[in-house]
């Protein structure tokens, strides 16, 4: 019986899979401020709904202060976000980072189911320190490496 000359034990991949590291974002302070203001707007909206929701069945008029304060916080923080987020641009695609448009989202955009793409990016930014752009799909991080700080 003739023995085979070559027998591969396991096929080896020709290329290793490469993952790109998240890029460092250049305007950290303004990005964090916009993310915190968006979170504050969400808290103000929930406080307003809680005030109205408690005032309706109980009939106590003291809850209207919570509803009005929540509505005021919501409105003020959304106006501030509108003004500050217009100047946050992506260095790669030059689109706005925290303004949602009616454009088609990237296939790699991150979204938690009940939330919008922007709310998902804010939660990801505040809890993990990274976020993915919804229009170009680029992963960004808050921390800068020492090599980027020297440049």
Image (cartoon, rainbow, N blue to C red):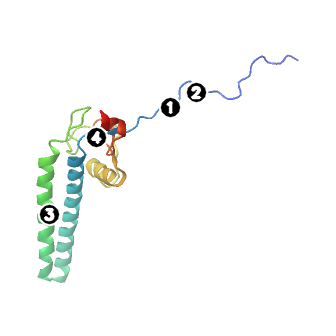
Dot placed on the residue nearer the N-terminal end, 4 or 2: 2
In the rendered image, the vertical position of residue 47 relative to residue 62, given as above or below? above
Which residue is drawn at the image coordinates 22% and 66% (left, top)?
46
Q: Mark 2 points at which residue?
A: 13
Please identify the quadrant where the C terminus is shown: top left
CA gap, disc 4 and disc 2? 34 Å
Whole-percent x, y for residue 134 in the image? 29, 41
From the viewer's perspective, tell me whether residue 63 is left or right of residue 104: left
CA gap, disc 2 and disc 3? 56 Å
Dots 1 and 2: beta carbons under 8 Å? yes
From this viewpoint, is residue 91 visible? yes
From this viewpoint, is residue 137 visible? no
Residue 73's disc is: 3
Answer with the quarter of the image where residue 147 lies: top left
Which residue is drawn at the image coordinates 21% and 52% (left, top)?
33
Q: Mark 1 points at which residue?
A: 17
CA gap, disc 1 and disc 3? 47 Å
Q: What element carries label 4?
A: loop
């Amino acid at each position: 019986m003739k023995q085979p000359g070559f027998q591969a034990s396991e096929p080896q991949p020709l290329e290793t899979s490469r993952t790109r590291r998240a890029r460092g974002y250049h305007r950290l302070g303004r990005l964090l401020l916009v993310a915190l203001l968006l979170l504050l707007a969400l808290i103000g909206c929930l406080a307003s709904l809680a005030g109205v929701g408690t005032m309706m069945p109980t009939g106590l008029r003291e809850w209207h202060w919570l509803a009005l304060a929540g509505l005021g916080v919501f409105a003020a923080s959304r106006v501030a976000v509108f003004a500050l987020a217009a100047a946050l641009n992506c260095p790669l695609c030059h689109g706005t980072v925290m303004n949602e448009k009616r454009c088609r989202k990237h296939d790699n955009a991150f979204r938690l189911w009940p939330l919008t793409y922007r709310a998902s990016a804010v939660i990801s930014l505040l809890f993990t320190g990274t976020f993915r752009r919804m229009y170009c799909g680029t992963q960004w991080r808050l921390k800068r490496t020492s090599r980027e700080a020297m440049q």
